[in-house]
Image (spheres, rainbow, N blue to C red):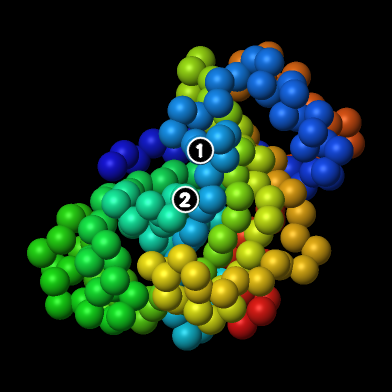
Amino acid sequence: MGAKFRNEWKHEITASDRICLRQRLGAVMKRDPHAVDGVYEIRSLYFDNLADKALREKIDGVNRREKFRIRYYNGDKSFISLEKKSKLNGLCNKVSTRLTEEQAGMIVNGEYGWMPEGAPLVQELYAKILSQGLRPMTIVDYTREPFIYAPGNVRVTIDYNIRTGLRCTDLLNWDCVTIPVRDAPILLEVKWDEYLPEVIRQAVQLGSRRAEAFSKYAACRMYG
């Protein structure tokens, strides 16, 4: 776990942009070695409360906000993480801790008694389950193409095929039905620490494209 905040750009792009970017990024960056055939299939379960606190803060552009999610990749339940993503003054921070499949299942099923003895982030989620009424809210699935560049600790991702589980929270059931989010864009995300190297800045230039505040969770919650 760490507390470092990073810079983040998000751009909505077209299918032709994606083809162009894939070629450019592949020429100057490395593919993430943990990806399978160059991509991740990501499944996340997001938390919110009955007042839609996380959703409203995102829509309203609250300067300091956070959201919790459980995530795993490519259907591999041997590596599941609980994550808290925070945003402050336009900078982003993510802290995470590992969960076992059993622990993730207990959270999904509302079995919280073990959480006070868990890792610090598990304890924090438990406290906010009690104080804010956080509950598992919906599944978000998507495909991600990740690229990495060591100087500046740069990570560039292209996300597409965004799907929603509606009100489904059965995170561990890979066969859980999800449906495509209508009009969901292809997303380019660029994240870096203190500086963004010029070679990467040039590679991600797309003319008139401007940074967006698109949220996969918010888009999926429009369905329920």
- Is residue 100 visible in the rendered image? The answer is yes
Q: Quadrant of the C terminus?
A: bottom right
Categorize mark 2 by other alpha carbons within 10 Å: few (<14), some (14-19), many (20+). some
Q: Position of residue 185 (x, y in %)?
A: 76, 54
Q: Quadrant of the N terminus?
A: top left
Of residue 72 and residue 207, the one placed in the foreground of this image is 72
Of residue 133 and residue 223, the one placed in the foreground of this image is 223
Q: Position of residue 24 (x, y in %)?
A: 74, 21
Q: Position of residue 93 (x, y in %)?
A: 44, 44
Q: Position of residue 60 (x, y in %)?
A: 64, 67
Residue with the most extreme bottom position: 50
Callouts 1 and 2 close, C-beta under 8 Å: yes
- Is residue 62 visible in the rendered image? The answer is no
Q: Quadrant of residue 142?
A: bottom right
Which SS class for mark 1? loop
Residue at left offset 51%, top offset 15%: 151
Which SS class for mark 2? loop
Residue 1 to residue 122: above or below: above
Q: Is residue 117 left or right of residue 43?
A: left
Q: Which residue is mark 2?
A: 74
Categorize mark 1 by other alpha carbons within 10 Å: few (<14), some (14-19), many (20+). few
Q: Which residue is mark 1?
A: 36
